[in-house]
Image (cartoon, rainbow, N blue to C red):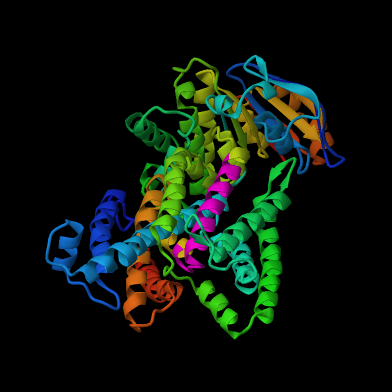
Amino acid sequence: MTTLSSRLLTPKRCAVILLLALPIVSLLGLMTGPVFIPLTDMLSIILGGEGASSQEKLIIEIIRLPRVVLSLIVGALLATCGALLQGLFRNPLADPALIGVSAGASVGASTMIVFGVLLSANGILLGLTAISLGAFVGAIITSVIIFRLATSPQGTSVATMLLAGIAISALAGAATNTMSYLADNDMLRRISLWQMGNLQGASWESVGLCAFVAGMLGALIPRDTGALNAMLLGESEARHLGVNVEWLKRRLIIYSALGVAISVAVAGMIAFVGLMIPHLIRLLVGPDHRSLLPLSALAGAILLVAADALARVVIAPAELPVGVVTALLGAPFFLWLLVVQRGRS
Amino acid sequence: MLKIDSVGLTISAVPLLNNITIDCPRGSVTALMGPNGAGKTSLLKVISGEHSATQGSVEINGQRREQWTQADIAQFMAVLPQSSTLAFSFTAEEVVALGRTPYGTGLVRDGEIVDAALAKVDASYLAQRSFVQLSGGEKQRVQLARVLAQIWEHCEAVADTDGILLLDEPSAAFDMAHQLMLIDIVQQISAQGVTVVMVMHDLNLAAKCADQMVFMNCGECTAVGTVTELLTPELIKKVFSVDAEVIIHPLQGTPMVVV
């Protein structure tokens, strides 16, 4: 019997693989698109050398680089927040939809798409379009409502949160449907495309905003990984292990609502990453959050960059919504991993 | 050291505990016994801080329960719940290592403690197995190792404070050999100064290691005393509504309940 018989990889080995894959996938992401830019040209652009045309240089600097960097950050945020929520709910099937973030974002975005024309629809604030701003506000409002509903003087009930989340999501769904009903054909198309997620709107401003949130979460979350591990045993067990469970729950909900809301705001709804990436990493290296969270962030970043690159080339010059690709790419791989895992145990 | 002084507990207008007074000196073993719904687990939860007493007070190591922070108390008090669910596949070893959460003693020291704790509960061979795939008794042994790891320094009598261990039906899932192992562990650690309070259903098993027995019924303390004082046919009839004989163990000389 090997020492880690129930694990496919050690955290270290997994980190090495992901760290090797990350630059490769990112380079591929920069190279591919409607205009293919060969590796040599791209390296000379990045390294500041000669040889690439000015058109290629523009494509890389203004379009592809911010887009790839945004994909990296959004992928990392979605996967990390998914892992946080699964730990918090002690349920490997939890995803950001549970705390109402996605549903709220939908309402906000579709409201902006339908009524935003009344405001100046093209107004941009900190790299956020009116639609992203609507999504962000909608996401934060719903998660605050759900959190309030589940919190009583005795503390926050995770079970109530789950039920409230489902009910509020249904309510938000009705609101979104109403918006879709009021929308004209063009708006309707924009609403449904938004719901499939895309990274077309990437700009250095939106990268900066996401990087700020990601950096903040990256600094804060590592302090709670040990407590999050204890939480997996149960709330009272964690309490007996000295964890201040109430504050931990609050912090984790704020972190994940913030992380998901900003991702949804800049990239729309991207399915699969938050649910499957942490699950996948758990299958590979086990549920210890000290390795699970950083590895999920890496894997989420890689998946989203790869998915976005594919989204740009599959039906070029048109683009597939990246959410469609994440599911198409990730789901079969995930199923394969499940089968492998079942075969081993 | 643990002092429970006229503790009452009422939750949503339902009285669960009424006027309970128990004194558990350092290194003593107290067995809480009584029929289902007698309030044994509720009392344990008041001690562990999950419920706060609505009347009376609990004093732990010379200070009232509410005055300790959760983080401080976790450094000398460990709690083994009746059962716990874990949906994530930690290895048994990782589960035990979670017992070291309150400390920053470092991976090497914690690793030694985890190995020793697993060995103590006869579960070394389970170390690398996935916790979720273990049997009920194996899970409970691993959880026992986890709480022992949490107060390991106290079990070895090298800590500054007095350790307290609360066990809620620790032996329920154990086979006979492991029930005796549990008794052995409880005796060992109490000899090192750890105060043990445990909920038990098996009177004879409790009689083997308890310094003090508490009979509870309907949220009240019916009787507190030594094993010989409490194990009488009259009291057993009164508390458990069972006709029982009490005989003396032919070799150990301890009382034995036969039904």
Q: Is residue A255 magenta?
A: yes
Question: The magenta stretch spans which residues?
Answer: A248-273
Task: Name the image quarter holding residue A117.
Answer: bottom right
B87 vs A305, left or right, is: right
A57 vs B247, left or right, is: left
Task: Name the image quarter holding residue A222.
Answer: top left
Residue at image position (65%, 70%) is A118
Which of B32 and A263 lies nearest the eye of the viewer?
A263
- Whole-percent x and y of residue A14? 29, 54
- Whole-percent x and y of residue A324? 44, 76
B16 vs A31, left or right, is: right
- Whole-percent x and y of residue B174? 54, 45
Residue at image position (37%, 76%) is A311
Residue at image position (25%, 60%) is A21
Which of B251 and A181 lies nearest the eye of the viewer?
A181
B128 vs A55, left or right, is: right
The quadrant in which the C terminus of chain B is found is: top right
Q: Main secondary structure of the magenta part?
A: helix
Residue at the extreme right of the image, as rendered: B13
Which of A202 and A146 lies nearest the eye of the viewer?
A202
Q: Is residue A268 magenta?
A: yes
Residue B157 lies, with reference to residue A77, above or below; the image says above
Total labels: the figure holds 0
Asked if residue B175 can be seen in this view, the reply is: no
The quadrant in which the N terminus of chain B is found is: top right
Asked if residue A311 can be seen in this view, the reply is: yes
Residue B207 lies, with reference to residue B179, above or below; the image says above
Which of B245 and B155 lies nearest the eye of the viewer?
B155
Residue at image position (56%, 28%) is B71
Residue A190 lies, with reference to residue A286, above or below; the image says below
Task: Name the image quarter holding residue B202.
Answer: top right
- Whole-percent x and y of residue A88? 55, 50
